[in-house]
Every structure is written in C-alpha cells, then in structure tokens.
C-alpha cells in the first residue's frame, strides 16, 4: 500500500492550497451574507484547472482522476467550505453530463462548467419527496420533439444562481416508482421557470431554493440516459459526490483543529497554557484521529472509483459519518476558543453552520445506513 501523493497530485494540491489561502480564505467570512458566488473568482479557479479536473480532456478537463479531484476539494474547503461546492457540483454534474448527455450537449456545457462560466445544479428533492426520492411527482410529458415539465423542485442548492439544472422528472406512472423517472438537463433561463431563495442558517452563498416549472418545454435530446432510467443510471453519480462531501466537511474540521491547537498554546488559565489540560488537548487529539480515519475512508472510496470498482457502500459511509464527525469536531473547537468562539470574529461558528447542512443535503444519515445495509445483505436490509 502506498499512501503518498504522486508529483502531479502534489503540484495541483499546492496550487489549490495557494489559491485557496490567498484568494478564498480572506473572503470566507465576508461571503457569509452573500447569496451568489462571484463569477470572476470562479473563472480564476477555472483558469487554474481547479474545477472539473477529473473530467475528460475532450471537453477541457485534465482527466486527473477522482482521488486528485478529492485533493482539490479538500484544499479549497480548508479555506472556504462553500467554494468547495463548485468542485463538488462540477464533478458530479459534469460527470453525469459527460456520461449521459448527447455529445453536442456535453460539448456545449462541460467546457463552460470547467472554465467557471456555468453553474449546474442538481434537482431531485420535491416538497413531498426527500428521502423517499423515488416518489417524486414533477411531470414530464412528451409532445413531439419536446417534453413539457410541470411541478416543483425544492431545497435545491444554487437554485437562484445556476445556469442549468439536472432535473429528475416522472415520465412514467407513479406506480412505476424509480423505474418511471427520467433526468433532463434543463437551462434555467426559461421564463416559465420561477426560482426562490431560502433564508438558511449556513451555506448562504451557495443558497437553496425552489424551482417551479410551468409548462417548460425541454427538447427530447436533453434527456440524460435512457427514458425511465434517470434514477437507476444517473443517480449513481451520488456515489462520487458523497466521498467528496466527506472531504469537504472534514477539511473544515481539520483547519478548525489546527486553529485550536494554536489558540490553546497561546491562551493561559490557572497559570498554564490551556493546551496542557487534558480537557482541551484530548478532544483535539480525538479530532485528529477522526480526521485521519475519515480521510482514509474518503480517499479509499475515490480510489475504488478510479479503479472502476464498486464503492456504493463506502460512499454512503463517507456521507453519513464525515459531516457528523466534522460537526462534532468543529463544535469542540468552538468551545476551546471560550467566549470568543461564540462570536462572529472567528470563522469556527460559520463552519459549524455550513457543515451542518450536509448532515441533511445529499441524504440524511439513516438513508445512508439503509444503503450500506442494502449493499451488505440486499433487500433484507431495507425497511420497505
Ligand atoms: C444544505 C442542503 C442542500 C441540499 N441540496 C440539495 C440539492 O442540491 N438538490 C436536491 O435535490 N436536494 C437537496 N437538498 C435536499 C436534501 O437532499 C433532502 O432534504 C434530504 O434528502 C432529506 O429529505 P427531506 O428534507 O424531505 O426529509 P424527509 O425525507 O422528510 O425526512 C425527515 C426525517 O425523517 C428521517 N427519515 C426519512 N425516512 C427515513 C427512514 N426510512 N428511516 C429512518 N429515518 C428516515 C430523515 O432522516 C429525516 O431526519 C439539500 C438539503 C440541504 C439541507
């Protein structure tokens, strides 16, 4: 087993870290009140090859592999948790488009995703279908060369600022459940699409919102994968994003631990550095242990994906465990900073709010555990 990074990985890791420290980290807290990304920063990130680096060279990607894409997510998230959504969604959605879109549609969208010119959201959740996503209702009816979309998606990241969304729709009957679902790439500049923005406690610059579709005509050629196969084919992309989410969350915890060691060595109580108290050093030592373990799990998952091996259970493990453990570590770090930790002067409270969203987004812990059980023992591990 070799746990070292190769030359190419070290080089992209270094360039991601430098860009993240110089350009992103100083703005992380300033962006806490903003509701959309600065497209110029995204373009800078794109020029450096930091968006969609795993995507095909044919479309302007670098084909650096999934492990390397994970390194970029980790480095970006250390400086700015929310900015790492850009890599995450570019990798997830760019990968789906690359695999399932018509070549000319992929050639139109992927280069713009990679350059930072286009943001693509993923729209699965509906008011009555979250965890039970196969129960979705948004209707797509074929009329000649188009499908006509009617219904609502809700809780969609980037809803108010994305240029397009991968939208999961019902093309079959409700009784068909997952088998009646098809996915489309839908440009969001259609006047028949209304968008709203939620007032969230974290991840404000990413933003969530609803998308209302009122007789929205989408060309048949915009379907991703086969008709009725949206759930079965396209959702496999989540096995990838779940490992990246793990790294995104744990990076925020790691930088919080680093700051806390430094703070604990500078702060005195009872005539000693507080780092000498086990009540301070042990939670940080535990945090270091969890960080190491989570990273190993996430990179192993990405390595399995690079090897073309099955990684559904591992991805679900990343998704339920990393956001939870990261939240707990960041919480400990906040407490170690005493009264100052509760103030907005430090970024720790913002990381806590931002990371919390991913205990829900992309599927809650119980749903991930059902996936793990299903992968291990089949339908006997599923409650329905
Ligand atoms: C920050 C954030 C970003 C998001 N981004 C997106 C996005 O970009 N695109 C998108 O489509 N969606 C997105 N979502 C929505 C997210 O995927 C859903 O909120 C999530 O899947 C849960 O669905 P729900 O909110 O409807 O909860 P419900 O499904 O109603 O669940 C409510 C509670 O019941 C529990 N529960 C449900 N079923 C079971 C079960 N079988 N066993 C045990 N417990 C169960 C859940 O764990 C949860 O605690 C985002 C959400 C958040 C918070």
Image (tube, rainbow, N blue to C red):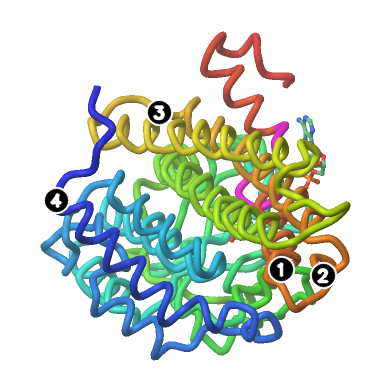
Is disc 2 surrounded by few (<14), some (14 to 19) or many (20+) residues within 10 Å?
Answer: few
Give the residue at mark 4: 7
Is disc 1 surrounded by few (<14), some (14 to 19) or many (20+) residues within 10 Å?
Answer: many
* Secondary structure category for the residue under label 3: loop
Residue nearest the viewer, comparing 306 with 223: 306
- Give residue 152's mark: none
Which x, y percent locates residue 337?
Answer: 78, 60
Mark 3–mark 2 distance (CA, rounded to whole Å): 41 Å
Q: Which of the marked residues, 4 or 1, is nearer the chain's N terminus? A: 4
Q: Do residues under tags 4 and 1 come within 8 Å of each other at their CB atoms? A: no
Does the segment drawn in magenta span residue 364?
A: yes
Q: Nearer the viewer, mark 4 or mark 2?
A: 2
Mark 4–mark 3 distance (CA, rounded to whole Å): 26 Å
Q: Nearer the viewer, mark 2 or mark 1?
A: 2
Magenta stretch in the rendered image: 360-366
Q: Do residues under tags 4 and 2 come within 8 Å of each other at their CB atoms? A: no
Q: Residue furthest left?
A: 58
Q: Do residues under tags 3 and 1 come within 8 Å of each other at their CB atoms? A: no
Mark 3–mark 1 distance (CA, rounded to whole Å): 31 Å
Is any part of residue 5 visible from this angle? yes
Give the residue at mark 1: 350
Picture residue at 71% right of the left edge, 72% below the top: 346
Mark 4–mark 2 distance (CA, rounded to whole Å): 41 Å
* Secondary structure category for the residue under label 4: helix
């Amino acid at each position: 087993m070799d746990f070292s990074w190769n030359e190419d990985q070290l080089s992209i890791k270094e360039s991601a870290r430098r860009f993240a420290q110089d350009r992103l980290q100083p703005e992380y807290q300033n962006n806490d009140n903003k509701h959309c990304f600065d497209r110029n920063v995204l373009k800078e990130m794109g020029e450096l090859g930091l968006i969609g680096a795993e995507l095909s060279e044919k479309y302007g990607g670098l084909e650096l592999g999934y492990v390397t894409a994970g390194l970029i997510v980790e480095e970006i998230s250390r400086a700015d948790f929310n900015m790492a959504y850009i890599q995450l969604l570019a990798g997830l959605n760019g990968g789906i488009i690359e695999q399932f879109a018509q070549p000319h549609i992929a050639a139109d969208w992927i280069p713009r995703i990679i350059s930072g010119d286009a943001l693509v959201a993923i729209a699965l959740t509906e008011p009555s279908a979250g965890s039970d996503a196969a129960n979705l209702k948004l209707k797509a009816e074929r009329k000649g060369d188009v499908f006509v979309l009617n219904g609502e998606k809700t809780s969609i990241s980037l809803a108010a600022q994305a240029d397009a969304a991968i939208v999961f729709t019902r093309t079959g009957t409700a009784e068909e459940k997952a088998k009646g679902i098809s996915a489309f790439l839908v440009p969001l500049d259609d006047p028949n699409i209304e968008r709203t923005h939620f007032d969230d406690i974290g991840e404000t610059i990413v933003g969530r919102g609803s998308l209302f579709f009122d007789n929205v005509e989408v060309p048949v050629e915009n379907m991703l994968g086969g008709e009725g196969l949206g759930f079965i084919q396209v959702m496999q992309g989540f096995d990838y994003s779940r490992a990246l989410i793990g790294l995104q969350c744990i990076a925020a915890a790691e930088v919080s631990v680093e700051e806390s060691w430094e703070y604990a060595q500078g702060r005195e109580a009872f005539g000693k550095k507080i780092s000498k108290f086990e009540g301070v050093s042990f939670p940080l030592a535990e945090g270091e242990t969890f960080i190491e373990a989570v990273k190993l799990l996430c990179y192993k998952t990405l390595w399995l994906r690079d090897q073309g091996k099955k990684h559904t259970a591992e991805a679900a493990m990343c998704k339920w465990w990393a956001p939870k453990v990261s939240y707990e570590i960041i919480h400990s770090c906040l407490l170690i900073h005493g009264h100052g930790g509760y103030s907005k002067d430090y970024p720790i409270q913002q990381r806590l709010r931002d990371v919390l969203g991913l205990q829900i987004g992309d599927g809650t812990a119980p749903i991930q555990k059902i996936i793990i059980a299903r992968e291990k023992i089949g339908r006997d591990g599923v409650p329905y």
